[in-house]
Image (tube, rainbow, N blue to C red):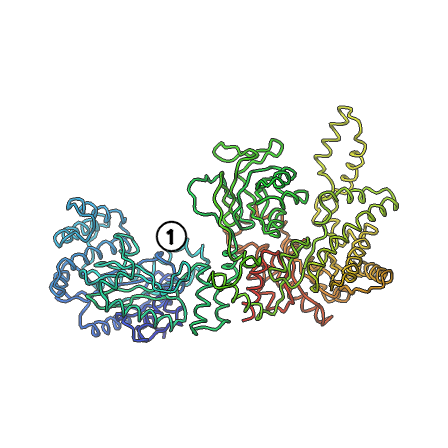
Amino acid sequence: MTTYVYDFHQGNKDLRDLLGGKGANLAEMTNMGLPVPPGFTITTVACREYLAHGRVPAALRDEVDEHLRALEQAMGRRLGDPDDPLLVSVRSGAKFSMPGMMDTVLNIGLSDASVSGLARQSGSPRFAWDSYRRLLAMFGRTVLEVPDELFDDALETVKKARGANSDLELDETDLCGLAGTFRTIVRDRTGRDFPQDPREQLDLAIRAVFDSWNGERARLYRRQERIPADLGTAVNVVAMVFGNLGMDSGTGVAFTRDPGNGDQGVYGDYLQNAQGEDVVAGIRNTLPLTALASVDRPAYDQLLSVMATLERHYRDLCDIEFTIERNKLWMLQTRVGKRTAAAAFRIAVQLVDEGLITMDEALARVTGAQLAQLMFPRFAADGRARQIARGMNASPGAAVGKAVFDSRRAVQLAAAGVPVILVRRETNPDDLDGMIAAQGILTSRGGKTSHAAVVARGMGRTCVCGAEEIDVDTHRRQAAVPGGLVVHEGDVLSIDGSSGVVYLGEVPVVPSPVVEYFEGKLRVDGSDPLVDAVHRIMTHADAAARLGVRANADTAQDAERARRFGAVGIGLCRTEHMFLGERRKLVERLILANGDEEADAALAALLPLQRDDFVEILAAMDGLPVTIRLLDPPLHEFLPDLTDLSVRVGVAAATGEAGVDGEVVLLEAVRRLHEENPMLGLRGVRLGLLIPGLVALQVRAIAEAAVIRRRRGGDPRPEIMVPLVGAVQELEVVREQAERVLAEVAAESGIDVPALIGTMIEVPRAALTAGQIAGAAQFFSFGTNDLTQMSWGFSRDDVESSFFSRYLELGIFGVSPFESLDRDGVGRLVRLAAEEGRAARPELKLGVCGEHGGDPDSVHFFHRIGLDYVSCSPFRLPVARLEAGRAAV
Ligand code: PEP
Ligand code: MG
């Protein structure tokens, strides 16, 4: 038979599912011998049954009767006894804390009759009427759904009539009158009298708490916090202790350490002559907890000792609620307290130093998301700047600069030392220089995996994308924003990549000491306890991790930073990023080449440039693996836009303008290469197979760079990666070409630098035929961006700014599959490919280089399925390292 009610003596802290957090912890404290008023907990099972069937389970009433009798016996009073009433509180308490979202009713058991008994017994009629008016208002509001303002207004009216600033100045007569007014309000609004039968009050309050699980506020909160909707709440029925019995009584909340910054010491607020809700409601100004020492030293000392006991017992920061009734301390609640990211790191290492937890536990208690929060520069609070739009928080941070609308201008101004924000409708590879030069990037289109977002995250640049309210006019170098405002080039913008908010004007920015530490600019010398804590936990994470963490980096600067940030290699060097800017013309020559000779010349011109890039990158990553990916994107990305060019050529033809023959040839090429679906078109390995000499050029550049590094005494470890393979035959052809070139360079130079040859697994067919592909690959690197795109059939550049928000609202997924790996679908492909790949070739190295490599949840998944490494943008490295460590403990 189901048991619906547990006495506090029967529960413990591990029964949160059943008793809710509050009930489980009240039970734990009771069993620890701490001063907890007696009481019992109605389980979440009872709540779920009530919500499912719309009525209280039949056996619940009997169980409540039984526990109530025991409570009455323990207290030596009967509930609502007219001569000497026992009063109880009815408090909600779900498994996960939902502060203020559900209902609580205090002083159940008071009635017109028992209020006089309470007055006599306590010797304080004022207290008795104060308690009764509180019950009437709380019960009226939560159980009978009378609007709160009616009670508040009535209280204010009495206060005004008495010239009182605070409810403390009201006397017995005022409060008695107020109780009368409240009763009338209840009758007028509900058509019935406030129930005088204490047991009826109790039953109604229990049901009201059950119902509050599905209240509007609670539902909203759950959705935001991702708390499952079907857990239900427990209900705690607790003998009342009174903080409103006089100035020797009071109520308070406290933390065993500062939850804001982790400082040691006791923090909290205390309010004399008050009941619980007054503290939270801010009815009167509270005293700092330390002031309790002078008000009531023995109670204060006991409180500190209880808090120390709780911390030792829970081995963590606790927050508590307590009441002092005529100098006697009572504990009403405790739980492991919420804290900021900085406090989480600091408290974790403090607890290690105090011998309460191990370093493994400290590591488990902080998260990558918290570390990421500590790494962003922040806007200091500033009321002056005006919010003009909100887009997607694509790459975190706080950036301030003058608005510029094209890349060239961004570079010019930045070179002159002017900080700029690059504002574009969307970005493309041509914007790279401008993006590098800018403090931040703002686009009006595109989602979190748009070019702007991916590149910005890669560079650690702040980026807000898809801010659709902004109408960007590149030609006029301005943008219209809501409210009829126009932002012109040179106007200052501040963009918050963590919230997606865009401000007009300058908001002051504070740098992150944690980033300065990772950059090696801050020493770990005890002067900054947060940096100390981060350092110790990171060191432990690295030692614990089984997954290596590499970086996605395409430049020597990125590679250097990645190394400072702890990368153990490069997992993805996107070579297309090396063909931009000035070099684009050279690629254009290759594409437009008329015959082998011209093509060879174009390739020959590219070779030294590629080689020099690789020399630098291999130097920055000396002794560590560098995975270089052969050219991936469709060729049209290196040519001008079809529409723009058609217009230019058309206008020239109409006006008889001379000298545009080159443009006409270009237009033909652009037309020839135009694809309706370029993402599914001529890109990746397909390019290598179609453009003679392309693979050879890139492999030669890699091999020659490695030889140069060797000659300079270095230890280059290049790996060659082929993108977008779907069939082993594709890889075999490229591999053969690559091996031939490697052998040629070895023969020419007399230096043989071994290079692994592997492939990306980013086309579903590659994952499904991984066993075959492993026959030709020495490593796999999962390109989970494309694998997600192709598994779901979602265009990674479009969907996040179009229908994803609706999908999230509908709960089709809780988070974008481009952000956190979809384990059931894409994850299954990755697991299958890893297993079949390894079965075919046991020494096969397995990594991930899609954006998911830096996502905490995904990192845990990759750890579990036994991959060797993840690779992510340099700025996400510390987060990935931390999570790789956490996954292993
Ligand atoms: C991928 O598809 O996951 C990947 C890393 O390649 P890119 O993002 O360059 O397409
Ligand atoms: Mg890809």
User: Would you say 421 lies left or right of 140 here?
Assistant: right
User: Would you say 885 lies left or right of 526 here?
Assistant: right
Figure quadrant of residue 518: bottom right
User: Would you say 58 lies left or right of 444 here?
Assistant: left
Q: Is mark 1 within 8 Å of ligand 1?
A: no
Which residue lies at the image location 74% right of the left edge and 62% below the top edge? Answer: 716
Q: Camera-side residue: 526 or 47?
A: 526
Pinpoint residue 430: horizontal percent, then vertical percent.
68, 42
Q: Height in image: 791 above or below 504?
A: below
SS label for mark 1? helix
* Circle count: 1
Q: Height in image: 471 above or below 844?
A: above
Pinpoint residue 152: horizontal percent, then vertical percent.
24, 48
Q: Quadrant of the N terminus?
A: bottom left
Pinpoint residue 723: horizontal percent, then vertical percent.
73, 56
| Ligand number 2: quarter of image | bottom right
Name the residue beneath numbered marker 1.
216
Q: Camera-side residue: 191 or 723?
A: 723
Figure quadrant of residue 269: bottom left
What's the residue type where badge 1 is placed?
Glu
Figure quadrant of residue 119: bottom left
Q: Is residue 430 visible?
A: yes
User: Would you say 644 lies left or right of 240 here?
Assistant: right
Q: Quadrant of the C terminus?
A: bottom right
Pinpoint residue 349: horizontal percent, then vertical percent.
46, 68
Neighbor class of circle 1 (other Cα within 10 Å; few <14, some 14-19, many 20+) is: few
Q: Is residue 729 visible?
A: no
